[in-house]
Image (tube, grey):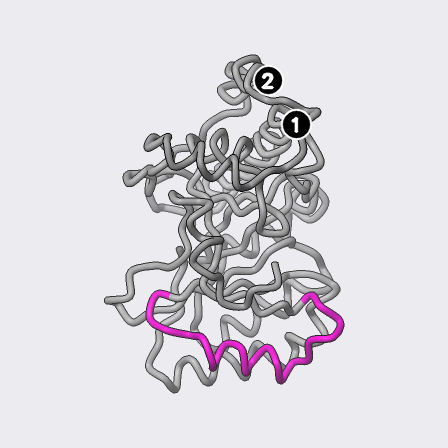
Amino acid sequence: MIFQHPIKPFRLLYPSALWRMDRADGSVYLTFDDGPIPQSTPFLLETLRQFDAKATFFVVGDNVRKYPELFEAILREGHAVGNHTFHHLRAKNCSVAHYLDDIGKAQDLIENASEFFEKESGEMKKEKNFFPSRKNFLEKEKIFLEKEDENTGENYEDEKKENEKNPSLDLSDNEALPLFRPPHGTIPLRHYRAVAERYRIVQWDIVTRDYNRHVSAEHIVHTIQAYARPGSIINMHDSLRSIDKLHTALPAALEWLIQQGYTLQTL
């Protein structure tokens, strides 16, 4: 998305999504999308360790499959993980059922890898979150397909009106659900309805656009300095497009945030 600080109409499209954490505790929440990958993740982990900072990694399932040792390193360092689909799917390009299946495939891998690490290392002692299984997703596949008109293009005005008539989307008690962030930050409301029943959808308060070749390291730091506030969820990327800039921007941003009195915590 192009909004560095999401505007209210955009936030209202996704009423149960998490855009900002509680402002009362004086924390900000770094999040990294798209990893893990060997060209980027080790640097991110080392830098976070140097500043005693924690973050949340929204991982792509296929990358977890290819680099299980990096996923294990994220867990060992005490960071949180969330689901970013298995194939980094853009929701508007696939059916609801296909999207749910891809998310479920990633979730199965994340859950199994986390449980294996806990069993083998004994280092993960925190209470498990509820992990909905892929099977549970597919049990409702026919219902979603019946509601979906694949020949109809995205019409957010119509979907917004429908959404306003459906209070069931305002899930106030979804903290127990595992975390999910849609690739590219956008998700049609027909997909959103299905995912929100099973996942806590996480968006952001600040997007640094570190993936954009026209955005410099200095601009990334300036964006954080301009928009950071207590409870901010900051969107960054664990990717080839971002890492060269993050070599400079991440240490500078962490140093500034700590100087301002913020603590860096997991979602």
| In the image: residue 110, left or right of residue 15 | right
**Of the residues under marks 1 and 2, which one precedes in the sequence?**
1
Quarter the N terminus occupies: bottom right
Q: CA distance from mark 1 to mark 2?
A: 8 Å
- Badge 2 local density, few (<14 within 10 Å), some, or many (20+)? few
User: Toward which corner of the image does residue 78 lie, by quadrant?
Assistant: bottom left
> What kind of element bears circle 2?
helix
Amino acid beneath label 2: Leu
| Position in image of residue 25 (x %, y %) | 26, 67
Residue 217 on the magenta segment: yes
Quarter the C terminus occupies: bottom left
* Residue at 71 percent of width and 68 percent of height: 212
* Residue at 61 percent of width and 63 percent of height: 2
Q: Looking at the image, do the residues carrying marks 1 and 2 touch, with CB atoms under 8 Å apart?
A: yes
Using the image, tell me which numbered label, if any, was put on residue 145: 2
Amino acid beneath label 1: Ser
| Position in image of residue 140 (x %, y %) | 51, 16
Work out whether 256 lies above or below 154: below
Q: Which residue is mark 1?
A: 95
| In the image: residue 203, left or right of residue 230 | right
**Extreme residue toward the left, this view:** 24
| Position in image of residue 63 (x %, y %) | 69, 47
| Position in image of residue 254 (x %, y %) | 48, 78
Of residues 138 and 90, the one drawn nearer to the viewer in this rendering: 90
Work out whether 211 lies above or below 14: below
> What kind of element bears circle 1?
loop
Residues in magenta, as a range: 211-231
Of residues 136 and 44, the one drawn nearer to the viewer in this rendering: 136
Of residues 199 and 113, the one drawn nearer to the viewer in this rendering: 199
| In the image: residue 118, left or right of residue 87 | left
Using the image, tell me which numbered label, if any, was put on residue 24: none
